Image (cartoon, coloured by chain):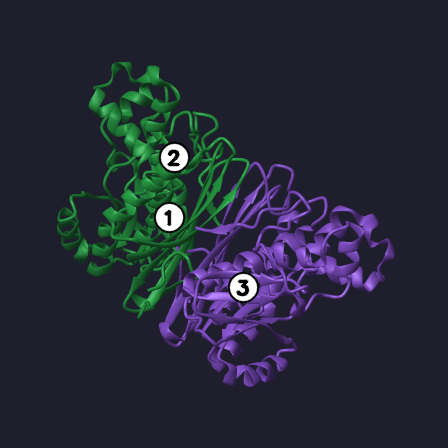
Chain colours: A green, B purple
Amino acid sequence: VVGSGDDAAVTVPGGATAVSVDALVEGVHFRRETASLHSIGHKALAAALSDLAAMGAAPGEAYIQLGIPPDLDAAGCLEIADGVAAVAAAHRVAVPGGDVTRSPVLVVAVTVVGHAASAERFVRRAGARPGDALAVTGELGGAAAGLLLLERPELAAGLEPSIAEALRRRQLEPEPRLDAGRALAEVGVSAMVDLSDGLGGDAGHLATASGRRLTIELGLLPVQEGVAAVAEAVAADPLELAVGRGEDYELLAAIPDERLDEARAQLAGTGLALTSIGRVTEGEGLKLLGPDGRERPPGGFDQLGDRPERSAPA
Amino acid sequence: VVGSGDDAAVTVPGGATAVSVDALVEGVHFRRETASLHSIGHKALAAALSDLAAMGAAPGEAYIQLGIPPDLDAAGCLEIADGVAAVAAAHRVAVPGGDVTRSPVLVVAVTVVGHAASAERFVRRAGARPGDALAVTGELGGAAAGLLLLERPELAAGLEPSIAEALRRRQLEPEPRLDAGRALAEVGVSAMVDLSDGLGGDAGHLATASGRRLTIELGLLPVQEGVAAVAEAVAADPLELAVGRGEDYELLAAIPDERLDEARAQLAGTGLALTSIGRVTEGEGLKLLGPDGRERPPGGFDQLGDRPERSAPA
């Protein structure tokens, strides 16, 4: 109703709202040497919206807080705003307000507000039931492989240029799975989470919140094209890129078997695959089974050293 | 409904909502040498809530994004959280979620959500009408004088210790005028803004948004006790501290004359004075008249050099 320029932005939600905050900090979540200003704006909003996707929310408004370092001029700020605006337009998100301040490094903090007819329509992390199938949208591992290609461009030597570019874009300009999240909420999934920290971590959150055991067969994971080649180039396990790393921003849902076909059909309408990768049982914790049938520790096969931090929800 | 720990926090507003974002950045808005961690948390939430006060909103929820520098330990983070919690409790604000990340300097970014029965119940900056009185809550200049005392402790030599302490607290731990803002909204004021950037700047915003001229008689300003003494100690005009500086977080309202008595009575119930300081007329812009009857430029008598930046709404 009231946009930028008054003390606050006014909306009339008319239902239940979901609010999530997310921040990208230079040197922690991105480097300007490898990420364009446009992509930084894109990713900041996309990462925040991914949390709404995981709730099955209809996206509403976004509020942007920019911390501008001394070496960034007005044209640079506009590039960031363009990246934000591109994602906002693609998902029909309004950006009614924000805040700009000086800062020693570039900070893009985003607050997103999503909507549903009632609070019960949002999908929680708690709610997975014994017997539910575990299914994941899209493909995994691309964001981690893309980061390796950005940090070490020579790794792209053996890859098709279009495949390498798709991996880099997966890292720089992720797409929040908002349509898929709403479709899955309407089908009636039991629980859902977005894969921002990596399947190992996020599936663990879902297991804990639901008080159930999640068993995932790693051989079933839909790994993005080119991930295996990048993993091989750094002598790593491709599953490490798909499980131990994050930022793919796909959705993991617990779905009753009888709704799985409908869920898959609904997602096909959004252009995304839905792949069954495991099962919910009584018990607790997360069990990852390797293609060899042996158990793998959820965060325990990290061979790649330091990675950029994902901001952790408080 | 859903607090911290899920992908997003869920609420059921049932009316209109006002959202505002505000951020404090170390080295820009505060220095840890002069501000305790508790007061940094306090001020970050208070400054954000002040925008809701200016809308006449009932405060609802706050979301905190903390950027934590390497030299801040868990105990320090808890001190900040305590400062946030103190303000939240005083104003019955829920803090259902947030986000914590690493950062090169301490950043406290706050998103606040306020409520009203309908969008029309919020008070805007636009709406001042010719003939309206201009009135300000509480007292001015204290935050600026307090900052001088923090930066140059020797200036407190000639002051009563309790007066100096009140000035420092005014700078470090401002109180958002939420009760006053709601009371003024119920009385029916025409327009309102909070004084975060200073009367000269914020009254100008109200004049611009309303498309009217605001004339303020500086001799009528309610200047806090001790401000004149601090100004004298730095050879400055006390009005500079009350007008050219910000962070008092009082409210400036345009009020029809026939409602002024009721407004004053309602505010007395919240323990705050309401002082008439000027008038709205046809025309445009802000006119500040000195005690000598001569016009003063709104931002033009700044004799104190650099000041900490107030974060500017985008």
Is residue B19 placed above or below A247 in the rendered structure? Answer: below
Q: Mark 2 points at which residue?
A: A75
Q: Name the residue under label 1.
A: A48
Query: With A243 as the anchor, is B205 left or right in this view?
Result: right
- Tell me which corner region of the image, top left, top right, bottom left or bottom right, holds residue A140: top left
| Disc 2 and disc 3 on one polypeptide chain | no
Q: What residue type is labelled 2?
A: Ala
Identify the residue shown where x is 20% and y is 24%.
Answer: A162
One can see residue B2 in this view: no
Query: With B64 as the anchor, is A256 left or right in this view?
Result: left
For label 3, the SS is strand
Q: Pick whichever, B80 or B139, lies toward us.
A: B139
Chain of the residue on which disc 3 is drawn: B
Q: Which amino acid does label 1 sit on?
A: Ala
Q: In which quarter of the image is the N terminus of chain A?
A: bottom left
Q: Could you tell me if the residues under marks 2 and 1 are in contact, i.e. CB atoms within 8 Å?
A: no
Mark 3 and mark 1: span between their CA atoms?
29 Å
Please provide percent x and percent y for residue A256: 23, 57
Q: Pick whichever, A281 or A59, lies toward us.
A: A59
Q: Mark 3 points at which residue?
A: B194
Chain of the residue on which disc 2 is drawn: A
Please provide percent x and percent y for residue A306: 48, 28
Query: With A280 as the anchor, is B54 left or right in this view?
Result: right
Q: Which amino acid does label 3 sit on?
A: Asp
For label 1, the SS is helix
Q: Could you tell me if the residues under marks 3 and 1 are in contact, i.e. CB atoms within 8 Å?
A: no
